[in-house]
Image (cartoon, grey):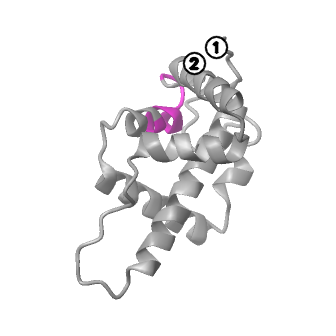
Amino acid sequence: MRKVYRGSGELLKLVEEIFSARFSAETAMLKSRMGDQEEVIGTAANFPQSTAGFLAEKYKHKTAVYQKAADIVRSVEMEREECVVVELFAKFLAEVYDTRDLIFFLYARSQVEKELDLKLTALQGEKSTFLPGNRE
């Protein structure tokens, strides 16, 4: 498989889509378990598994999924030192942070979107100094 650097604009947009999809899955799971007495800590899938599931759902074909995963790995390697969002994404993928940390981060992220009346996935299309995480 070839590894292609896709540039931070595309990578940031994909990272935000992955975070949004995971938050939606967590929210749906919590709503379905509202009546349960047990402590609910995240979905059954860890972050790498849910990321792979997101890619499989988005790209459908096995070859395209593998190619996109390889592209992400290469792009993360190239961008992580320059962008805190990419560094954070890399740490979640490497499971440096656990599911509790992920859920807290996703909740805080959603609250920022609500309070500032913005959608992070919409902002990530272009590289801009306004984007959170750009160290320019």
Inspect the image, locate mark 2, and give the three-letter code of the amino acid beneath it: Arg
What residue sits 58% from the left and 56% below the top? Answer: 21
Which is nearer the eye, 70 or 98?
70
Q: Residue at x 57, y 44 (%)?
A: 132
- Closer to the chain start, of discs 2 and 1, is 1
Q: Which residue lies furthest to the right in this view?
A: 126
Position in image of residue 90 (x %, y %): 44, 32
Residue 127 spot, x, y in % from top left: 72, 34
Instruction: Write down the residue under mark 2.
Output: 74
What is the three-letter code of the residue carrying label 1?
Lys
Mark 2 residue element: helix
Q: As drawn, which residue projects farthest toward the bottom?
A: 35
Q: Which of 49 and 41 is in front in this view?
A: 49
Q: Residue at x 70, y 24 (%)?
A: 7
Secondary element at tag 1: loop
Which region shows up in magenta?
Answer: 81-89
